[in-house]
Amino acid sequence: MKITIICPHFAPDTAPTGEVITQIVSELGHLGHHIHVITSLPWYQHHAVEPEWTGRLIRSEKTPWGKITRIHPFASKNRSNLLTRAIAFCAFSCAAALAGLFSRRSQVVLTMSPPLTLALAGWIAAKRHKAPLVLNIQDVHPDAAVETGTLTDDRLIRLLKRIEITSYEKADAVTVLSDDLRKRLSTRTDTESKLRVIPNFVDTERIQPGNRNNAYRRELGLTDETIVMYAGNVGFSQPLEIVLEAARYMIERDDVVFVINGNGSRRLHFEQEAEDLANITFMDYQPQDRLNEVLAAGDIHLIPLQKGLSSISVPSKLYSILAAGRPVLASVDLGSEIDLVVTRSGAGRTAAAGDTEQFIAALAALIDDPHGRAAAGLEARRFAEEWLSAAAVADSYNELFLELQQ
């Protein structure tokens, strides 16, 4: 089958959604499909096109399974400016739509959201190819921006909601990551039957449990201390205030160190807030080939989400942590998919989103129970191996594509 996939990131870009779609494409390629990926030039880590990829607005490359067309993302380093980000998304989406229009005929088109504008690019490509459109929802927008308070203009919210609803109407199938998301979108689609739950996956071959005493830990100047780690985007969806409060509560403990590994629009803010906290270290995003090392160095991994966001988003880093065999402490809406995965798998603990006291108590209990942490890590790895394989997820997409051909 000939497939066109339009996505915001693809390897070697370091965005989590890029890792997901890259592996799905690889697995679909193994099934014999011919795939044209339309994506951006790598830019996620520094919010600017990587130096080795500059010089051209569009680049093409052939692969064993097909072709990749990479387009300039028009990104601005000012991550907090919503207008410049919106202009960049629109410009990239228009260019992606043109690339889809002039590509060879496909039998199915898959596009990812966010950004919302890529859904319209996928629809244009699908109309051109007279092919069914599959819309993959990684985060529900504009809900996420509204919930975090980054989007408050009523007129803009109404416009984005209209784009969102139109996107669902134009799609032949909409894939979501969890039952939470399916229920949330059930009243927004013209027919609920087009909603399909296909979770993200983790590459359990590439991500494996490793030695905690590794080079990354040595770079931090640490030895046997308990490392409490947040690794991921530092933005408005992640209430890292709760992590700073936990660090402040444990400031007298010289056996516990907090590490925030990542970049984003709010990193500078949190660095300033943590200036008086000697037990917090900030680290930049690490290259993908160090992911195992970073995950292994953390003794407890944190997944904090703003209240209300757990039904909108399932962070892919959760699956990576499970595959690495490390315990998780999630500050999320109770009863959400994240809460259920963590508790049912035995991979750690959850605290109600926004409940600082409960979060600190759960964290202290994990810190003081190394044997319990080891057991949780084993359960995390077991769960990842049994339920989160890339091949199983690719098979689900393959079955959906074949169904839409009938």
Image (spheres, rainbow, N blue to C red):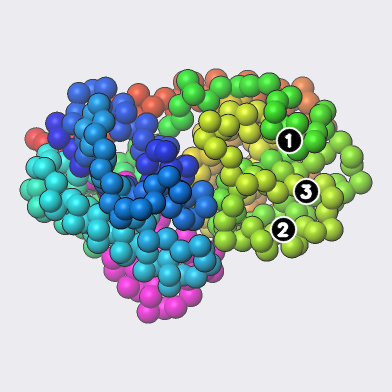
Labels 3 and 1 touching (C-beta < 8 A): no
**What is the span of residues highlighted in magenta in the rendered image?**
134-163
- Quarter of the image holding residue 324? top right
Query: Closest to the observer: 63 or 113?
Result: 63
Which residue in the structure is indicated by mark 3?
A: 280
Residue 50 left/right relative to 187: right
| SS of the residue under disc 2 | helix
Q: Earlier in the sequence, mark 3 or mark 1?
A: 1
Q: Is residue 379 visible?
A: no
Q: Picture coordinates of residue 179 (x, y %)? A: 41, 43
Give amino acid for label 1.
Answer: Glu
Amino acid, disc 3: Ile
Q: Residue furthest right?
A: 252
SS at mark 1?
helix
In the image as oriented, which residue stretches furthest toward the front?
Answer: 55
Name the residue at 74% across, 62% down: 272
Q: Is residue 235 visible?
A: yes
Q: Quadrant location of the C terminus?
A: top left
Q: Which residue is mark 1?
A: 219
Residue at coordinates 42% horizontally, 78% vertically from top-left? 154
Vertical order, 43 against 31 (above or below):
below
State the residue position of label 2: 271
Q: How far apart are labels 3 and 2 at the CA level?
A: 9 Å
> Which quadrant of the rendered structure holds the N terminus?
top left
Mark identifier at residue 302? none
Residue type at the position of mark 2? Glu
Residue at 49% across / 55% down in the picture?
47
Name which quarter of the figure residue 367 lies in: top right
The CA distance from mark 2 to mark 1 is 19 Å
Give the class, few, some or many, for how many residues have Cα within 10 Å of label 3's Cα (few <14, many ≥20).
Answer: many
x%, y% of residue 334?
58, 47
